[in-house]
Amino acid sequence: MDKIISMENVTAHLKDGMTLMIGGFLANGTPDELIDCLIKNNVKDLTIICNDTGFPDRGIGRLVVNKQVKKVITSHIGTNPETGRQMNEGELEVLLVPQGTLIERIRSAGAGLGGFLTPTGIGTVVEEGKEKIVIDGKTYLLELPIKADMALIKGSRVDKKGNVWYNKSTRNFNPIMATAADVVIVEADEIVEVDEIEASNVVTPSIFVDYIVGGRG
C-alpha cells in the first residue's frame, strides 16, 4: 500500500464532529499543513486532544480562533487568550488535564491498558467525578485511557513505509499520539527511501502510520 497521499486526499478522511489528536508543544512539532487543510475545508465541531492550544496565529490556536473546535482536552491554554475567552463565554468546552496525566492517558490507550493510578489531582478539581483507590494508605485517582478517531502528527524525516524520525524537541507528543488513534497521518518535512533512516533512529515504526503527506523539505 502506498502511504503517500496529497493534501487533497486527506480531505476524504476529515469529518465534522471527529476527535483528533494533534501533536506539538507550543506550536513546535505541530503539523501546520494539516491544520491548514482543516481550516481550508472548515471541518468543525471538533474535539481536539493536545498538549496546549498554541497561539492565536500559530498551531492549534488557529482552529480555536476559527471556531472549528467544540471541545479541547489539554494541559495548557495560557498562550492563547482566545481559548480562555471562548471558555468563559461558554462557546468552547475546555477540559484541563495535568500534563503528565494527559500523556499517560494517551499512552495507556496505545498500550491497551485499562487505565492507571496517580496521586496527581487529589484534593483539587481534577478529582471530581473520578474513582479513588486507596493502596497502602495512600489515595490515588483512577485515570482512564483516551484515544482519538485520528492523530495528526509531524515528523522530520519519514520513509516511504511510514517510519518516522523526529528532530530534537519536535518529538514531544507526536510518537505517543501515533499509538492511540484509529487513523494516523504524519506530515513530513522530508520523505526518504526506506533504507535512509537508520533503524536505531526510528521513533515511530511504520506499523502505526496510515498516511504520509508533505515532504517538501
Image: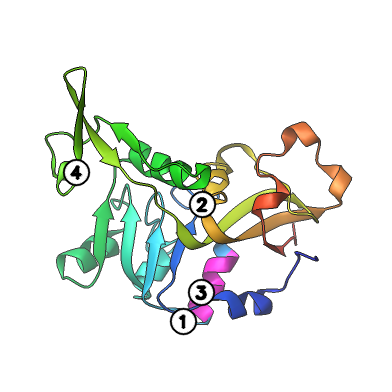
Query: Can residue 59 be seen by looking at this rendering?
Result: no
Q: For mark 1, does the 10 Å Cα neighbourhood hold few (<14), some (14 to 19), or many (20 or more) residues?
A: some
Give the SS element for disc 2. Answer: loop
The Cα atoms of the two marked residues, 4 and 2, are separated by 23 Å
From the image, state whether disc 4 or disc 1 is nearer to you. 4
From the image, state whether disc 4 or disc 2 is nearer to you. 2
**Residue at image mark 3:** 38
**Residue at image mark 2:** 180
Residue 216 is a magenta residue: no
Asked if disc 1 and disc 2 are in contact, CB closer than 8 Å, the reply is no
Which three-letter amino acid code belongs to the residue tagged 4?
Val
The Cα atoms of the two marked residues, 2 and 3, are separated by 20 Å
The x, y position of residue 184, in whole percent, is 60, 59
Which three-letter amino acid code belongs to the residue tagged 2?
Ala
**Residue at image mark 4:** 126
Q: Mark 2 or mark 3: name the one nearer the start of the chain.
A: 3
Q: For mark 4, does the 10 Å Cα neighbourhood hold few (<14), some (14 to 19), or many (20 or more) residues?
A: some
Residue ID at (74%, 57%): 217
**Residue at image mark 1:** 42
Which three-letter amino acid code belongs to the residue tagged 1?
Asn
